[in-house]
Image: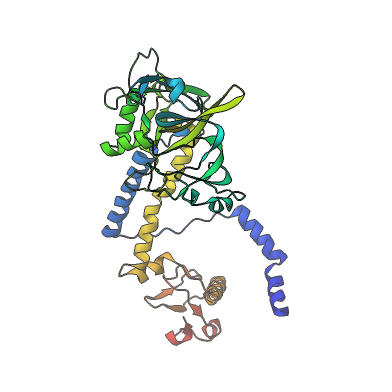
């Protein structure tokens, strides 16, 4: 531990800190550049640079609008209206006309609307009656069967069980024998019977839906609407008039469900449909060109794929009093729930965004050199040779030898060696030079050599054995 702290103390000396600060302020470092003459690597590098350049300029800057500042945090407001007249046929072969106030339930929702296309209606009053046929536990043969549920009500019960068993001599509506009956309840009577054929709203497919949408792009402080200037009465058609905000229910259903059987089931049992408005605006042009694109999709599962809780339905009731007695009309409504979703973004030229994206593009452009370096240094045949030139390894012993050589050369230059020869030996070149002016004028190439100065002073000539490479 003492040795460890001693090493740290030797490293963080005042002299080292001074040289570090001085070098940081006065020295400039640059990467080592090695030029390799190879057609293969040169072609590979240029091809990759061209591909990256095309990707950056064409896709990132032009296609993805990299020169624009984007805003996707839109503020939206939706208003929905449905118009159309429908009718139903009653049990007495009569026709009952209904309008928007009858089939739009509830009158207003947030970004959604429900259009009733089918319903079961039951007029009820507070009284005593038998339980529904849908509750299997209500089958009884005596009062004891019903008493066990008189205190602990069933979740699917339609009222409070009185504990009595109502037995009929013959029940033509189900398979119950004349010895059995139904438990009696106290509540709204008669209970709803799903076996009654529902009343289908005719002409529901000809109803029209008007979608009015206002959006604001806070970054650019621009407000747009989906209603074009001088708009005339129209109906949306994908190929002819795709800017019209008025939609026919028939066209919407046929778009989201091509199967005729499924469409009929949606009208009878209900369904959920999404209408999406997507804004994609370029405010470098006139803001009036900023209009949404409409798309449609079905959100609920298909009836052929789902056997439990199919379609979309709910119940609601309207109440009144007559002769101090309470009455209500219970309606089980089936229909189409239309959900409106709004999304979008807008862009406008911004110099800061452009410069940032150009800087990113330059970083991507350097990826070509990085890949070529990996291939050259690790996967080619001469990888070891390339690594010797690219990576320079420095050892302390080499640095000491170089410092000794510089000292010897300085000592030789200060002395006059007329008519004496110096022999320098290297791995590749042996050069013998004679100094005429008393100094060494040139040292030949390559690795530094260490000369034995003591023996030089004793002999006029130096053999190769006296030189320490």
The relative height of residue 209 versus residue 26 in the rendered view (above or below) is: above
Task: Identify the residue shown where x is 35% and y is 59%.
Answer: 372
Q: Quadrant of the N terminus?
A: bottom right
Q: Please, which colouring scheme is shown?
A: rainbow
| Residue visible at 47% across and 34% down in the picture | 70
Task: Determine which quarter of the picture holds residue 286.
Answer: top left
Residue 341 can be seen, yes or no: no
Where residue 313 sits: x, y (%)? Answer: 44, 37
Measured from the top left, where is residue 152 in percent x and y? 60, 51
Q: How many marks?
A: 0
Q: Is residue 109 above or below residue 431?
A: above
Name the residue located 53 percent from the left edge and 76 percent from the top edge.
401
- For the residue pair 317 and 305, the one nearer the viewer reads as 317
Q: Position of residue 364 (x, y in %)?
A: 41, 49
Q: In the image, 1: left or right of 32?
A: right
> With respect to residue 169, does 416 lie above or below?
below
Relative to residue 397, is residue 289 drawn left or right? left
Residue placed most toward the observer, 202 or 255: 202
In this view, the residue in front, 37 or 90, is: 90
Res 125 visible = yes
Q: Residue 396 appears in which quarter of the rendering? A: bottom right
């Amino acid at each position: 531990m003492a040795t460890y702290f001693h090493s740290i103390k030797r490293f963080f000396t005042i002299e080292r800190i001074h040289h570090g600060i001085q070098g940081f302020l006065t020295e400039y470092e640059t990467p080592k550049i090695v030029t390799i003459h190879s057609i293969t690597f040169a072609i590979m590098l240029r091809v990759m640079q061209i591909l990256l350049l095309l990707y950056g300029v064409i896709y990132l800057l032009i296609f993805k609008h990299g020169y624009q500042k984007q805003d996707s945090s839109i503020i939206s407001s939706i208003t929905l209206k449905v118009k159309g007249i429908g009718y139903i046929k009653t049990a007495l072969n009569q026709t009952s006309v209904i309008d928007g106030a009858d089939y739009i339930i509830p009158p207003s929702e947030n970004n959604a609307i429900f259009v009733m296309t089918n319903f079961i209606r039951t007029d009820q009053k507070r009284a005593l009656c038998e339980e529904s046929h849908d509750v299997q536990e209500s089958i009884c043969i005596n009062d004891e069967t019903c008493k066990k549920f008189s205190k602990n009500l069933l979740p699917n019960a339609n009222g409070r069980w009185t504990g009595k068993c109502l037995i009929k001599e013959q029940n033509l509506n189900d398979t119950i024998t004349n010895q059995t009956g139904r438990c009696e309840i106290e509540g709204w009577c008669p209970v709803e019977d799903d076996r009654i054929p529902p009343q289908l709203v005719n002409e529901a497919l000809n109803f029209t839906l008007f979608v009015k949408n206002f959006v604001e792009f806070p970054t650019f402080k621009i407000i747009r609407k989906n209603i074009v200037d001088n708009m005339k009465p129209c109906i949306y058609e994908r190929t002819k008039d795709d800017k019209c905000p008025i939609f026919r229910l028939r066209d919407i259903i046929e778009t989201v469900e091509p199967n005729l059987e499924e469409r009929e089931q949606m009208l009878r049992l209900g369904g959920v449909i999404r209408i999406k408005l997507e804004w994609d605006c370029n405010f470098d042009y006139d803001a009036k060109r900023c209009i949404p694109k409409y798309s449609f999709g079905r959100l609920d599962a298909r009836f052929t794929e789902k056997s439990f809780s199919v379609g979309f339905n709910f119940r609601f009731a309207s109440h009144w009093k007559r002769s101090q007695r309470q009455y209500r009309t219970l309606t089980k409504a089936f229909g189409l729930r239309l959900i409106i979703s709004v999304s979008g973004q807008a862009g406008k030229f911004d110099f800061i965004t452009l410069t940032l994206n150009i800087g990113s593009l330059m970083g991507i452009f350097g990826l070509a050199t990085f890949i070529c370096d990996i291939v050259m240094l690790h996967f080619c045949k001469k990888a070891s040779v390339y690594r010797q030139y690219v990576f320079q390894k420095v050892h302390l012993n080499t640095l000491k030898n170089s410092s000794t050589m510089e000292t010897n050369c300085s000592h030789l230059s200060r002395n006059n060696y007329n008519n004496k020869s110096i022999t320098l030996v290297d791995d590749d070149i042996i050069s013998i030079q004679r100094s005429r002016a008393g100094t060494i004028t040139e040292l030949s190439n390559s690795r530094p050599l260490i000369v034995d100065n003591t023996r030089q002073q004793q002999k006029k000539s130096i053999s190769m054995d006296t030189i320490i490479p």
